[in-house]
Image (cartoon, rainbow, N blue to C red):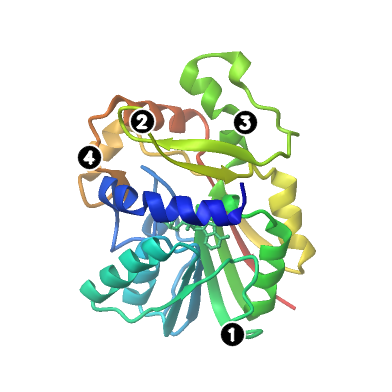
Amino acid sequence: MSNKKNEESWDHLSEFYQTHKKISLENVHYGPFGPGEKELRVIGDVEGLDVLELGCGGGQNSIVLAKWGAKSVTALDQSKKQLEYAKKLAKSQGVKIRFLKGNMEDLFMLDDASFDLIVSSHAMNYVEDLPRVFSEVARVLRKNGRIVTCMGHPIMHLLWEALEEGSIDKVNNYFDEKRKIWDWQDEKGAKIATFEDTAYRFEEIINGIISVGLTIERVLEPPGYTEAQIEKLGENKVPYQDTDYDNEAIHRFININQKIPFSLIVSAIKSK
Ligand SMILES: C[S@@+](CC[C@H](N)C(=O)[O-])C[C@H]1O[C@@H](n2cnc3c(N)ncnc32)[C@H](O)[C@@H]1O
């Protein structure tokens, strides 16, 4: 398995993913069935900023940032199919975004100090070399520029399977640094595509950001919404949902996300 395989798998999964997920075009999301930027206020005002999204997928977060007044938005992903979807969506939303195909581990096509804000949502766990990504982030950020990255929470990687299957034997080894190979399944459990990712530990994420000279401003580990909150908020206020809300697996997800955080959000600034 390699990065190339993940790229092919995202090409393969893209159509299924984009038809089964309901991702907001009015709020930046930080993962499924949880609060978004309007609620958490991590990114703040983007008016006049040059923004880069890493691992933009279908482009929803980039589209929102463009609607919120960013001066320019550049959105990078390595999957051709995800980018095709994103380009059509941006056009239909009437926003201008520069889409780039590439691997976020090597941003050779981007100049030093060319962005005020970098965002990334649930894409960095797929990379093989996270320190390299952070070093590229530090390079392309301007002075006082900020990164807001949202990754799979290390506790989630450790405990999710155990909580889902009700078995302590399924607790993973926190110190196991191996890349994990796993299948994306449809609602009936049939395999659609195989991925490889890393359950990056706290110290790898936090020290990785510090070691490239960035100053951490905030760390957030929000619980997901409860079913009652989701129903009260209604269709359009939950920034990342699933079309298959009645599926039992979704309700298990929502319940587990009350006990442990799914996402770890880190905001850091290039102060020097
Ligand atoms: C779970 S999707 C998230 C997409 C989007 N950020 C969202 O929240 O809807 C992960 C995305 O990261 C992209 N990706 C994974 N590894 C990447 C890499 N090394 N460089 C660029 N994109 C990558 C995938 O192609 C995929 O579109």
Q: Position of residue 189 (x, y in %)?
A: 36, 28
The span from disc 4 to disc 2 (Cα, nearest Å) is 32 Å
- The kind of residue on which mark 4 rests is Lys
Instruction: Give the labeled residue for mark 2.
Output: 190
Horizontal side of residue 228 vs 72, given as left or right: left
- The kind of residue on which mark 3 rests is Leu
Q: Residue at 47% across / 75% down in the picture?
A: 100
Horizontal side of residue 150 vs 97, given as left or right: right
- Nearer-N-terminus badge (4/3): 3
Q: Residue at 56% across / 35% down in the picture?
A: 156
- Nearer-N-terminus badge (1/2): 1
The span from disc 4 to disc 3 (Cα, nearest Å) is 31 Å
Q: Secondary structure at mark 1?
A: loop
The span from disc 1 to disc 3 (Cα, nearest Å) is 37 Å
Q: Nearer the viewer, mark 2 or mark 3?
A: 2
Q: Nearer the viewer, mark 4 or mark 3?
A: 3
Nearest to the observer: residue 162 or residue 117: 162
Q: Position of residue 223 (x, y in %)?
A: 46, 39
Q: Quadrant of residue 132?
A: bottom right
Q: Name the mark on residue 44.
A: none
- The kind of residue on which mark 2 rests is Ala
Q: Nearer the viewer, mark 1 or mark 2?
A: 2
Instruction: Give the labeled residue for mark 3.
Output: 158
Q: Is mark 1 within 8 Å of ligand 1?
A: no
Q: Secondary structure at mark 4?
A: helix
Instruction: Give the labeled residue for mark 4.
Output: 232
